[in-house]
Image (cartoon, rainbow, N blue to C red):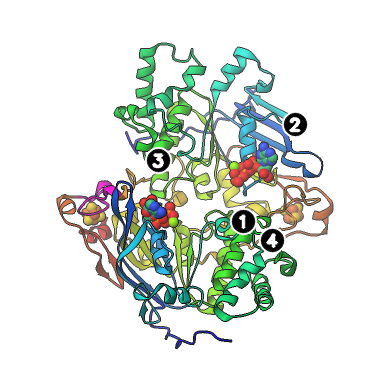
């Protein structure tokens, strides 16, 4: 087989290292910055969660990393390093070679991500034909193996079916099969279970984790679900309005958040709330990208806001233990 | 009063239906099918539901189990094939003319998607007051209407100045508040909320949940609250009904159902929901279900959950499971489940 035989990166070096990523979006009313200086890195075998609410830039970040950004958006700064190379500086052809064997992505909406007019067996086999030069028949055999692995019953017959003939949970399995086909170093999963039922969600998350263990992949898990982060990720990057506001080991961040937004999110989950008592809601809602204020991005909703926050944007600074937060007054949270 | 915290405690559950008064809502044996012949699908199969004034019933279950169909039956939009629906003892499907119009006023709906459900060309005031076009006598006087709109805006935590803004000028949470204000315009006894916070951001969801609970304690409105988020259902509901493929498979007081589920499906659903506790890997206590939800065109014999149940035995394939009834731990409804081998 003719795989690209790059030296296996050591486990301590990050499999993916994103630094200062900026993405601009051209809209009818002008250019806005959708991703503003996002940095994170993840090693093989580890799971990093990108957590944040709708529109905060999670998918844009993911799409920039795999080079699938919409034409309306463009990367205007930063670096995305895999296997020691900055992929942002590669030619489109070189970049395409990474998609599959090095970096791959699973999208939220399995129905639109699959080709509706092609049998699924052929689609899942496609990476083997493109990257490994297998024949159609050999590729289909590989596809059937993978379908078996992700738990599709009667894979040989089902390989001839079309996407709409599968349930939502099975379609998501098919996408995952396709994404792990070439044993990538890094798998990015963009809200892989959001559209699915609770019990099916649990099955998919378990499948992802088993595949991760088996193939020793680095996983970037994108979600707005705090509980999913709590249970599936090692590290978390909390995003707000295109920026990283807090980052660290999940356990640390969730037990003692250092950013008022993270704390507000954690408090507003009704999980342990007492019936009949109001939930401590964060007032207001996230800003429009075109109206992100100078100064701190969270100022309009922050209970600790004061004059300095309006004047000066806090940078993401270390708060010890490998953690960091972008707040002028993060120490005050420990006492609150 | 946005996100006001000064609410009174939720009203004590009132035992209704036991003291001679009929309950606000009583549904018995409701069945509803769609299609015919081999493409016939039973969306609701003998569903019972009961709800008192000022109370909240949570309705959970996986996609396609019949929650929205039941909601449409409760709103009188879908006539059941069999079974009865009673509001204060009255059958809404037997009403005509003015009586029907009067009844419609009492049962309102809040939809999942605040972006799709509001007409973009109407201002907040028009949207909130629109129901009065059909129900002219609720607030007959134009001056009084304006005043009432201001009251409704403030009830749901919006500003008076928001009256003349259009949906695209509001955030998701604010739009959902407009939807709630609109439902309240007719002073309903019951609001059916079908996934009212699912499309909202987490930090905004709590605001809307607070508005709903506060309105309940102030106005005594009852809710049927449909959600797939168990932590939300647990927080907002007095009682919980769990459905699976068109049947109610468990019902009881919220704490009874959450603390001691009897049905293997309910137990699995609760164990599968991830929790915030980072010190507990979810797999520790997760009951893993095999397989996928069966096709509604081909419901399994005996117990309909048996194809995924980890407690299933031969009997489950041949005999429909009986209702097992447990006394509630506190006051309230008995804790029932349909299972041969309950937990
Ligand atoms: N093709 C596009 N054209 C214009 N704006 C876009 C486009 N794609 C995304 N945006 C905007 O860019 C911002 C970031 O979007 P992104 O999809 O990264 O958010 P997200 O964090 O993934 O949110 P969600 O949780 O809703 O998926 C949003 O404000 C979004 O409206
Ligand atoms: N008008 C209709 N014609 C045919 N089938 C229908 C109709 N309405 C609902 N169904 C079917 O009835 C079943 C129950 O649907 P319903 O919308 O009540 O489910 P639900 O519990 O609300 O699901 P979800 O969580 O996905 O909203 C489904 O199998 C659905 O496809
Ligand atoms: S910098 Fe100021 S406004 Fe921003 S999060 Fe910290 S305290 Fe709040
Ligand atoms: S009746 Fe049998 S199959 Fe059905 S839930 Fe109970 S144990 Fe499981
Ligand atoms: Mg996204
Ligand atoms: Mg529904």
Which residue is the extreme one toward the right?
Answer: B318
Task: List x then y, in percent, for residue B24.
Answer: 60, 26
**Residue occupied by mark 4:** B291
Is A65 left or right of A306, judged from the image as shown? right
- The reply to whether callout 4 and callout 1 are in contact (CB within 8 Å) is no
Which residue is denoted by mark 3 in the rendering? Answer: B173
Query: Is residue B286 shown in magenta?
Result: no
Q: Determine the chain carrying the residue at label 3.
A: B
Circles 2 and 4 on the same chain? yes
> Which quarter of the figure is the N terminus of chain B placed in?
top left
Q: Name the chain under label 2.
A: B
In the image shown, does B19 or A233 lie closer to the viewer?
Answer: A233
CA distance separating discs 2 and 3: 37 Å
Quote the CA–CA distance across marks 4 and 1: 13 Å
Cβ of mark 1 under 8 Å from ligand 2: the answer is no
Mark 2 → mark 1, Cα distance in angstroms: 30 Å
Element class at badge 1: helix
The region drawn magenta spans A290-305
Residue in front for this viewpoint, B93 or A187: A187
Residue that numbered label 2 is attached to:
B81
């Amino acid at each position: 087989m003719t795989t690209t035989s790059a030296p296996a990166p050591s486990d301590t070096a990050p499999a993916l290292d994103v630094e200062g990523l900026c993405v601009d979006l051209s809209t009818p009313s002008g250019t806005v910055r959708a991703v503003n200086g996002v940095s994170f890195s993840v090693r093989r075998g580890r799971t990093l969660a990108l957590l944040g609410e709708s529109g905060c830039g999670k998918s844009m970040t993911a799409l920039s990393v795999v080079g699938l950004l919409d034409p309306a958006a463009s990367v205007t700064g930063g670096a995305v390093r895999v296997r020691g190379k900055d992929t942002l500086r590669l030619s489109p052809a070189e970049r395409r070679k990474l998609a599959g064997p090095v970096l791959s992505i699973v999208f939220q909406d399995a129905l639109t991500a699959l080709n509706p007019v092609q049998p699924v067996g052929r689609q899942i086999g496609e990476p083997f034909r493109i990257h490994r030069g297998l024949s159609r028949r050999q590729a289909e055999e590989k596809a059937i193996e993978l379908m078996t692995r992700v738990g599709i019953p009667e894979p040989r017959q089902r390989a001839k079916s079309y996407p709409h003939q599968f349930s939502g949970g099975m379609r998501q399995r098919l996408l995952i099969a396709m994404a792990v086909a070439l044993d990538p170093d890094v798998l990015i999963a963009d809200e892989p279970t959001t559209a699915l039922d609770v019990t099916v969600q649990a099955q998919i998350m378990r499948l992802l984790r088993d595949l991760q263990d088996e193939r020793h992949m680095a996983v970037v898990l994108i979600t707005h679900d705090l509980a999913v982060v709590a249970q599936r990720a090692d590290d978390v990057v909390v995003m707000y309005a295109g920026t990283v506001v807090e980052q660290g080991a999940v356990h640390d961040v969730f037990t003692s958040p250092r950013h008022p937004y993270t704390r507000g999110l954690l408090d507003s989950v009704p999980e342990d709330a007492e019936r009949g008592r109001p939930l401590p809601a964060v007032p207001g809602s996230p800003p429009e990208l075109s109206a992100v204020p100078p100064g701190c991005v969270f100022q309009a909703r922050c209970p600790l806001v004061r004059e300095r926050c309006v004047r000066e944007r806090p940078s993401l600074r270390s708060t010890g233990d490998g953690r960091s937060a972008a707040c002028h007054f993060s120490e005050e949270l420990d006492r609150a | 009063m946005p996100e006001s915290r000064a609410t009174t405690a939720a009203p004590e559950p009132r035992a209704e239906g036991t003291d001679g008064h009929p309950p606000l809502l009583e549904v018995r044996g409701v069945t509803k099918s769609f299609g015919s012949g081999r493409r016939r699908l039973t969306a609701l199969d003998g569903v019972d539901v009961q709800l008192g004034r000022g109370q909240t019933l949570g309705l959970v279950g996986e996609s396609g189990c019949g929650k929205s169909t039941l909601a449409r039956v409760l709103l009188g939009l879908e006539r059941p094939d069999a079974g009865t629906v009673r509001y204060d003892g009255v059958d809404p499907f037997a009403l005509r003319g003015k009586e029907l119009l009067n009844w419609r006023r009492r049962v309102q709906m809040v939809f999942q998607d605040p972006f799709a459900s509001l007409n973009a060309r109407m201002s907040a005031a028009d949207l909130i007051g629109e129901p009065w076009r059909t129900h002219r006598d609720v607030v007959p006087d134009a001056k009084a209407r304006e005043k009432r709109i201001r009251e409704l805006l403030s009830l749901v935590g919006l500003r008076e100045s928001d009256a003349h803004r259009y949906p695209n000028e509001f955030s998701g949470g604010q739009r959902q508040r407009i939807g709630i204000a609109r439902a309240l315009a007719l002073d309903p006894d019951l609001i059916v909320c079908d996934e009212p916070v699912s499309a909202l951001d987490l930090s905004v969801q709590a605001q809307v949940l607070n508005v709903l609970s506060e309105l309940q304690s102030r106005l005594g409105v009852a809710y049927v609250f449909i959600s797939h988020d168990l932590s939300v259902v647990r927080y907002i509901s007095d009682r919980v009904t769990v459905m699976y493929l068109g049947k109610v498979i468990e019902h009881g007081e919220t704490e009874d159902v959450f603390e001691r589920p009897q049905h293997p499906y309910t137990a699995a659903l609760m164990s599968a929901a991830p929790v915030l506790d980072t010190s507990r890997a979810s797999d520790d206590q997760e009951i893993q279900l095999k397989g996928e939800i069966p096709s509604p065109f081909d419901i399994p014999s005996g117990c309909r959950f048996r194809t995924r149940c980890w407690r299933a035995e031969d009997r489950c394939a041949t005999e429909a499971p009986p209702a097992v009834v447990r006394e509630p731990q506190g006051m309230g409804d008995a804790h029932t489940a349909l299972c041969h081998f309950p937990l």
